[in-house]
Amino acid sequence: MKMESNLTNTEVRLAVAQCFRTLSSSTDRQDVVAALQNLHSYLEDGPGCTITAAQREEFRRAHYTRTLQFLVSNIQADWVHSFSASQRTELWDGFFLKGPPDQSFLVLMEAIAELRPTTSLDHFVSITERFLQSGRLADLLWSYCLQAVSSDSPQLRETLLGRISALPDITANKLHPNNRPLFIPLQYYPLLATEMLTVLERTCQALRDGTDCSLTFVAQTLGKVCIQGHSASVLALMAPRLSVSTHSDMVWQRVCWKLLENVPLRWMESVLTGLVQAVRGPDALSRIIGNLVLTNKKAQFVLTHKLLLLQYKYETQVLRTILGYLAADRDRRPLLTQVLRSVSQAWANPSAVKHTSVEQQFYVSKALLLTVSLLKDSELQELRSELLQCMLGGMQSHLDSGVMRIRSMGMVVGECLSSRMDLSGTKLKFEYEQDADICELLSFMIPSTSDEPEPKLVNEVDNPEGTVKTVPSSHILSSQNSSASQLSRTKADSDLDSDDELAPYDMTGDQKMSQASPPRYLRDCLEILISSEDPERVELSLRGAESLVRRNVFAAKEISVQMTQVLLHMDDKYSIGGFLMLKQATMVALTVTDCIPVTQYLTTEFYSLNYSLRQRLDILEVLAIAAQELSKPVPKESAPSISAASTSELTQYPGDNPVHWRQVVETRLQSKTKRISKGTTQPASKATPNRYAPVAGYFFFPLLGNYDKPQVTFDLLGSDHLVLGRLIHTLGVFMHLAVNAPVAAQMGCALLDFVWTVRYHLDQMVRRGVLFAVCSVFLSMPGQSLLPDLGDQLFETRNWLSDVAEGDPDADCRSLAVQSLVLLDKTLKKQLQGPQAVNLDS
């Protein structure tokens, strides 16, 4: 046997060498055609062929690649160009489309990569297109499925994987801008997905026939393509087909499980991430990957930890798919309990609440509620103590946050957990504003209906495109809803037609008659607010207080501080509509009218004892709004004037007044004349003094004192970080409004010194306030004062802003840091270029 094999190898080697000599040296066209046909006989078994199977196998193994490389090197030979188009396709192109597909593919890709832009390159590109369109890529993958023991080297397999997965990149780099449409990623990767599905179908048929197959190379190809970022285009086509095929076919399920098991560990994450986004639901994922999460540690880490806790960019459907997959099987349910423990710990972690973005916390909240909704009552009872500890600690961390959205999430999750655990029949209930996110969280506690029925493959004759046709359930629901609404409408109409009942009289526009009258004097208003117990009189006084203050400036200045004190301590005892807004508007009017005394009182009371956080926040809001009003120009009082319409009505005879007649004619001419530009029609507004600039220091500097002295009921640098963030933001507003004020430079230096101590605060609202204040300093502080007054602190601030712009977990903080850096660089550049520009001009 060994002697016969050696004889066969020698015969094939000599025959191939003789053909090569003929093609290299012969000028006779018939000899060239005969040599090419002799080489073709080793690739196909035709009638009258004398080539044995052993010789054919030896040629494929040892001489096929050499033959292709010889043809590539002789593509410019005269005998090649002497062939007609049909002869060239049959005798020359056929070599690349009939032999072992892996060798042919590698030679084609090597030729495309090495040749320069010529007609020869175009010819090889056309052959590669025919290679892909004729299904040779599926033959390539299938050839590796039939090899029980891999005979190729790992280097060859790695090279082949790289060429298959990166074909669009290789051709784009070589053929740009004349690349072929088939090589574009949007067309190539769906084609590759189709070829892999063809190979999987052949594998299923081979297993039914009793033939063993290996899916290692197909799994490696899938993983290589996914890790390069093309999982969406590949799995979007493969996942629906796999879901349908595995619905009732156990052979397809076994093939899919084996395919996923053979994906290399380094590529498992990209495959699973794309798959959970492409499948329709947990049932489909269970059929495709089976219990992979139990046998593969990498898959378990990705599905139970990374996609739930370390990444938060995925849609809610991905969470439903993963958690539903874990809950669908008895062997996988312990992992669901493990997920609940890890997610609940992450949700309740105070450090995570402070240092992670709001989006990630919302994602974790969704994962927690979905996991709780999938657990049984018996499983929840085992985790009752852990969940209770998570609920109490997590709610405290969320409610302490200065971000309203985080506090709302804490309230909703606390409500849902308490209702699910049924704590002694008592359930937590909070008041919050329901937006889209909150409604989504609440919906997780409603038992979800079963998934839609899986689509079935229709007959290819009726549906040649192979698309899946399903009947959406929305039509059924809409028809049921419409019939129900028609029934209710018919019943309502029948009730209204009854003669025994009369329609009620519409009293929606009626107004309640008031017995009391609003106060006409400001002192009367103050007296009512102090001593009256009549809700109606108090409400009328509160509603008219602002207008009385603004109309009676002298009277307001006499009682400004006293009335501010009354309003600051006033509570909403009578549930007056818009109470906070009315009180705030009056205090703002008092501050604007009698600025210095009222401002001194409010800034002093901010650090006083026995004030609630709400009152301190009210002080800051009043001061900020008053400063904004003072910085705006005084509105000019409009004098009474008579309109043109009223004038024409008073003077019925224009002929009696020649001036008016000329005005009417001029007006008509102006209206009939078309002009490109008429210039300014109104006189320029006159400059008005800034009322805020002289008093900016009274607003600003008193609030910088005593911030580091904790009082009995107030710890600004401790637990009351909500007030600290609002204080810094208010100081930034004062700084921003003080632009062009003489005291702006002094304010900027003091504000930077103040915020420098809290620039690394744990609460993101405080950090946002610090960055806003720094941005206000760069906007309002005179540019010529930055370098002389701040010096080295300015460059330390720039380094800190760069760190924040790169590493802060809050997106708003990063954005504010970037804005501050841009303002600082512009100001420094202008100051550094100023003296040079002056010298050049001189």
Image: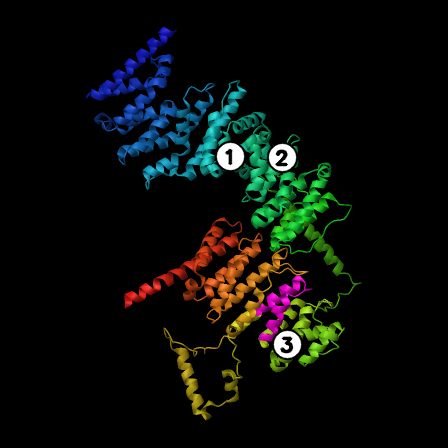
**Up-down relation of residue 98 to residue 495 (above or below):** above
Q: Residue at x 34, y 27 (%)?
A: 107
Which stretch is magenta?
596-625
Where does the image place residue 572, in percent across and percent down from the top left?
A: 71, 67
Tell me the kind of residue under disc 3. Answer: Ser
Q: Which residue is mark 1?
A: 271
Q: How far apart are the alpha carbons under marks 3 and 2?
A: 67 Å
- The correct choice, above or below, for 203 with respect to 445 in the image is above
Depth check, mark 1 against mark 3: the one in front is 3
Determine the secondary structure under disc 2. Answer: helix
Q: Residue type at mark 2? A: Leu
Residue 439 spot, x, y in % from top left: 64, 51
Front in this rendered view, residue 797 or 737? 797
Q: Earlier in the sequence, mark 1 or mark 2?
A: 1
Q: Which residue is mark 2?
A: 326
Q: Are marks 1 and 3 in contact (CB under 8 Å)?
A: no
Q: Is residue 753 above or below residue 27?
A: below
Callout 1 secondary element: helix
Q: Report the front residue among 107 and 613.
A: 613
Q: Which mark is residue 560?
A: 3
Please state which amino acid type lies under the numbered disc 1: Val
Q: Quadrant of the C terminus?
A: bottom left
